[in-house]
Amino acid sequence: MKFKFLMGAVCAAALATGAAAEGVKVGMITTLSGGGAGLGIDVRDGFMLAVKQSGRDDIEVVIEDDQRKPEVAVQLADKMIQSEKVDVMTGIIWSNLAMAVVPAAVAQGKFYLSPNAGPSALAGKGCNPNYFNVAWQNDNLHEAAGAYANDAGFKNSFILAPNYPAGQDALTGYKRLYGGDLAGEIYTQLGQTDYAAEIAQIRASGADSVFFFLPGGMGISFLKQYADSGVDLPVVGPAFSFDQGILQAVGAAALGVKNTSQWSKDLDNAANVAFVESFQAEYGRLPSLYASQGFDTALLLISAMEKADVSDADAFRAALKAADFASTRGDFAFASNHHPIQNIYVREVIQEGDVFTNKVVATGLENHSNAYVDECGM
Amino acid sequence: MTEPVLDIHGISKSFGAIEASRNVSLDLRPGEIHALIGPNGAGKSTLIAQIAGALAPDAGQVMLNGADVTALGTVERARLGLGRTFQISSLAMEHTVLQNAVLGALGERGGVFRFFRPIMSDPDLLRTARAALERVGLQDHERQRTADLSHGQRRQLEVAVALTLSPKVFLMDEPMAGLGAEGSQALTGLLDGLRTEAPILLVEHDMDAVFALADRISVLVYGEIIATGTPDEIRADARVREAYLGEEVA
Amino acid sequence: MSAVLFIEQVLNGLQLGVMLFLMAAGLTLIFGVMGLINLAHGSLYMVGAFAAAAVAGATGSFLLALMASLAAAAAAGAVVEVLVIRRLYARDHLDQVLATFALILIFSEGTRWIFGSFPLFLDIPAVLSGPVTLPGGIAYPKYRLAIILAGLAVAGGLYLLITRTRIGIQIRAGEADREMIAALGVDISKLYTLVFALGAALAGFAGALVGAIQSVQVGMGEPVLILAFVVIVIGGIGSIKGAFVGALLVGMTDTLGRFLLPGLFGLMMDPSAATTVGSALASMLIYVLMALVLLVRPTGLYGTA
Amino acid sequence: MTRERLVNAVILLGLLGTALGAWAMDAPYTITLATKVAILALAGVGLNIALGLGGLVSLGHAVFFGIGGYAMGILASHAQSYSPILTTPFVIEGTKSMPVIWLVAILASALAGLVIGALSLRTSGVYFIMITLAFGQMFFYFAISWPAYGGEDGLSIYVRNGFPGLNTLDPIQFFLICFVLLALGLGLTARLARSAFGLALTSARQNAARVQAVGISPYRLRLVAFMLSGMVTGLAGALYADLNRFVSPTMFSWQTSGEIMVFIILGGVGRLFGPVVGAAVFIVLEHVLGGLSEYWHIYLGALLLLVVLFARGGIIGLVAGREVAHD
């Protein structure tokens, strides 16, 4: 499906020639239907909010729904490159979709700004000058969870994730900085909804803490069942299972859980305060992590447009690399492999009135880069 | 006496407590029509299934041309020359009459795993198929869809398909069923001429046809053969009159 | 591995099995009586869960939520039966598969249209939250025990319904001979609607029960649907007894496989590879079980040809 | 018959014309869509051998589609990284040559068809539907969990594989390759239907006892049909992976099996060109309805329902009349 947002008065000439001299045409492929649509909707809304606030009339955004299917994403990318002739692409939520789209897109000279997925292949050997990740390298939040586990004095963690590449990366990421022992390590089935067997093993393992990475509905199921099981070991995980869109479905079961994130709605910087307020005003709901990432992605794009013309690829690339924008997460810079250097915070799930949300309780890692910088030749 | 073409020897079959076949022995000699009769529920269908190979007997033997085929299935027995017609017409209903006959010819000749040459222009198969159709009198209907045939015509086609197989034995399960008097007579004439080609084991309810055609008759009651003999012997057999005809009157 | 852990896992397998039985009973009943293969059964499970979550959200009562799930799924089932399904009884399985596949699309997107893309919340009732200590020192969630008991109660109720009541006699007659019961003057189309609604209500009930410990979201029905199909195929399609045995078999195989296989492979290879390979195999295990059962008994454990 | 032939010619020329027209007007994405139609249609043509001719309702044909896809993915990724697939007992190198990839895809599918068919064909009816579905799920979970070739992430190939003498990166040339293969697939299926094998297979669909009684084993007929069917769908899988330059476990999912079946039904069961029409309608709907509503699956579902309930000959049946022999 297709939504065209034409900002302000776009002159006909700019439309007709596609990549007009000053304007930028952005192709956004994201998940707007089926499971996981909430994430794509937040990225889109965050991105469009920043575009709107910039007041620029020379950004045209073509938005398409990938249905979370990699082959659909690839075909949409072909369409955007071949027919729409976009200059910059963005929007993909899932690592497997990014792996399907990004290498071919950047090979054809397009810029790709990732608002979410950061697979290790694109950070290491497969890094590319035209690829910028505005969110995180996939391992970051897991690494921060491992670091937090050390700070919290955990000595014997039980860790679990679904049996697919992102899940395997998550456990690797946690173990990278975590210094204690493992009470157990389990790979669950992707899409699994019942975790009774795993929880029983956690109970029997003698662990002192639990780390898990179970995105989407899997995390909701796990947390509800865990809370009900009577096992009350401290739980830590990446932000994905504790984000604004999902927390209401988990309910009180998530209260007190620590999760790691580069962003939180209560981060006290001017950009973030303004973002949270304007997002709520615009869409009538609290912004999520994904909304902040979409917002930052648009800010990065706009900051580069102010410095360089997209038709001058080298200048535009340098302008992107400078990352000269006020991120909602505070300090932000790109490492040499074009992934963020940023703080990763530890948040705790709290209740504000009727609404479940997060507050920052510690800083897990300061100015954290990623483990793949050296593998990348840039 | 010549060797029997089909020799069924001491077949028994039970389903739970029900003994459907009890030590049944039966043979079919060259050139004869051997009719198998018996009241409903006597176990004729079960016996046919065991002769055709669809059911395995609990005990006993089925010999075809001197070879023990007891362990073989339907397909193998058909290949060894058992030509069968079904009680309820069993044809490819969407296909034409000629296609059904050609299928029989194909089964007889072999070479089913040929993927490119159009089969309906294979001269050998067409010749065999048309010859068989002509013998049953369906030569003018070859392009008709089988589903559009009358009941009697389907019976004829059943026989024609069996003919294309050039079988060594015909196994016919109630070919007259549902035919009118006229149809019965026509088919009776046809079967009469067939026996010289290959002997026929005829399971039939139509007693006029049975007594007109059969060289020998066996009577099956409660899974057991109670008598075998010429039509005259069977007519005169007291046990048959008691068990079979007596029941029919009642 | 301690005995306590093993017993807990057996309970977990039992609970999964009982859950699957609720789904499978409806499927197999509908197949047995009407000869219909219904892919949209998972959608009715989803309808039950969404109805329960919506009602629980509005009233705060879990009991009302459960009743809503039964009512909504039964109503949805009856409507679908009258509008679509009854035109399919005389069709071949291919048409049934495709028409009910189409229903999945309609149900899923329709639900998303009404409730949005975010998962809904449904909580365990306060009385049943938390664990209870069983004899032998096994701490086990009360709610899961309640599911096991509820499932066994439904199984018992279904048994009584089919063996002891007038409607049950009609259902059994319908399985044996469709023309016969019509000849006996039973209003067959009413009976079919009733059976379909009953199957739907069971699925909706399962959806609501499970919704409280999982996430209530669009698409939640399909994974369960496929498991339920595995169950009825193993048990023999049309047999309620087969569905019960099959459900317990699948529940146990899946739970114990997930639990034991990684450890088993751990004896042969390094732990990290063992968990990967072991869990890969565990996720295929029930399908392997199903293939094996069908190879030995092509019509399932209690199926008739 | 002649009317259906005319309709068939219009369909094939329409597809070709769309792609050539798009080429002339420099609309490469439309060519990509036409290519997608040709490939998905070929997958449907494959399933139609089992389903239309043999009456085998396989809800697991995604297995072959996925095997074809992974044949391409594995061979091309090894060629891309210059690492052999196998070093002992002998060296097998990857390849970026389409004909070799196709051959591997077809052979691997035939092997899978042999194994799955030999086991599944012991059952029939609903059990057959379900056991093929179960095999599909086995492959799906295996592909997701097996880390060597990307698991859930799948495999990306940076450049489309090559075909001697052609530039496959040019959309119209790749389309023509797919189109020719589709035409070949249709031609071979048409001949197959009229061959000795076709007669025996369609007879077995209508009446298995009859086929047995003439000394032909329906089991062997169906097994061969299932294999042939898988081989064609496997080839389509390899092409689809090349179209996307990407392969993932989604190709193995049961929804994929369902969609391939939907093409056949939309077009008309037992119609040679049914899958072509079905795939074309599906793709057009995806793009037209997709542009109208986020919830376009509702309309797709409704349309499918209407076709199944009220237009059993499918779209070709509506246009060409119901003269085709089919149960």
Image: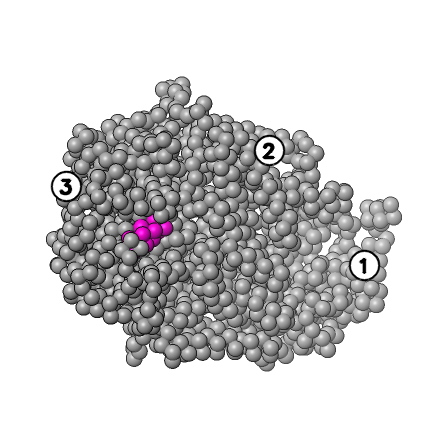
Instruction: Please tell me in which quadrant of the rendered image residue B28 appears.
Output: bottom right
Q: Main secondary structure of the magenta part?
A: helix
Tag 1: amino acid: Asp
Q: Which residue is located at x 38 percent, y 78 percent?
A: D25
Query: Which quadrant of the rendered structure holds the N terminus of chain A?
Result: bottom left
Q: Position of residue B85 (x, y in %)?
A: 68, 62
Chain of the residue on which disc 1 is drawn: B
Chain of the residue on which disc 2 is drawn: C
Tag in front: 1 or 2: 2
**Residue count near mark 3 (Cα–Cα under 10 Å), binned few <14, some 14–19, many ≥20:** few
The residue that label 1 is drawn on is B206
- Identify the image's colour scheme: rainbow, by chain, secondary structure or one colour: one colour
Tag in front: 3 or 2: 3
Instruction: Please tell me in which quadrant of the rendered image residue D61 appears.
Output: bottom left
Q: Is residue A41 magenta?
A: yes
Q: Position of residue B209 (x, y in %)?
A: 81, 62
Q: Nearer the viewer, residue A41 or D202?
A: A41
Q: Which residue is located at x 71 percent, y 58 percent?
A: B87
- Separation of residues labelled 1 and 3 (CA atoms): 99 Å
Q: Say if C124 sits above or below B146 in the image.
A: above
Q: Which residues are magenta?
A: A40-51
Q: Nearer the viewer, residue A44 or B200?
A: A44
Helix, strand or loop at mark 1 = loop
Q: Which mark is residue C158?
A: 2
- Separation of residues labelled 1 and 2 (CA atoms): 50 Å
Q: Is residue C304 left or right of residue A184?
A: right
Q: Position of residue A309 (x, y in %)?
A: 20, 66
Tag 3: amino acid: Glu
